[in-house]
Amino acid sequence: MKKDAAELLRRHGLQVTAQRLAVLAAVSHHPHGTADDVAGIVRAEIGVISRQAVYDALGILAEKGLVRRIQPAGSPARYEDRTADNHHHLICRTCGRMVDVDCAVGAAPCLTPADDSGFEIDEAEVIYWGRCPDCLARTPVRSGNEEKAASVRRVPQTSDGNDAGPSTT
């Protein structure tokens, strides 16, 4: 993996550093993590690294197209290494879990606007909001005029996208 990652960095004109390799690996193994999530994972792997070094690495990796930066409304930016397609995301309003979902219709840009206003569209970003199956199962069913669902937050917590609930990394 490290040899492949090092070659990937070189192909994109980037100097190979332990920090960049560790950040790339963290994003690969824990998709949809925030910069703070990534920093915690990297620190566990290589020791001391500043928050700024993580932000710098994520920034250059995103600029070169090696990671994708996603910033849902009201949420910190999250990062993933699934960059070769135009997939979308489902986010749980309760626990913040984020998962990938393939395009709703056809190939990129997936959705064709009614009026493109002369733009050449190369990407569509869609985020579906709701509640994940685990949060739905934990919500008590209420009767009468009471709401059937507990109130939910608009701002999700961080998640690696694979486990239900907030990330513990």
Image (cartoon, grey):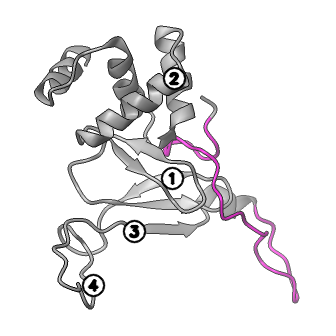
List the residue tagged with mark 4.
Answer: 113
Q: Name the amino acid, label 3.
A: Val
State the mark number for residue 126: 3
List the residue tagged with mark 2.
Answer: 41
Magenta span: chief secondary structure? loop
Quarter of the view holding residue 141? bottom right
* First of labels 2, 1 by sequence position: 2
Q: Do the residues labelled 1 and 4 touch (CB within 8 Å)?
A: no
Q: For mark 3, give the secondary structure.
A: loop
Q: Are marks 2 and 4 in contact (CB under 8 Å)?
A: no
Q: Name the amino acid, label 2.
A: Ile
Most foreground residue, 29 or 36: 36
Q: Name the amino acid, label 1.
A: Met
Q: Do the residues labelled 3 and 4 touch (CB within 8 Å)?
A: no
The span shown in magenta is 139-167
- Asked whether, in this view, residue 2 is left or right of residue 73, the answer is left
- Name above or below for residue 71 compared with residue 169: below
Instruction: State whether residue 29 appears in this view.
Output: no
Residue depth check, mark 2 versus mark 4: number of the one nearer the observer: 4
Query: Is 90 covered by the magenta stretch?
Result: no
The residue at the point 81 percent across, 67 percent down is 140
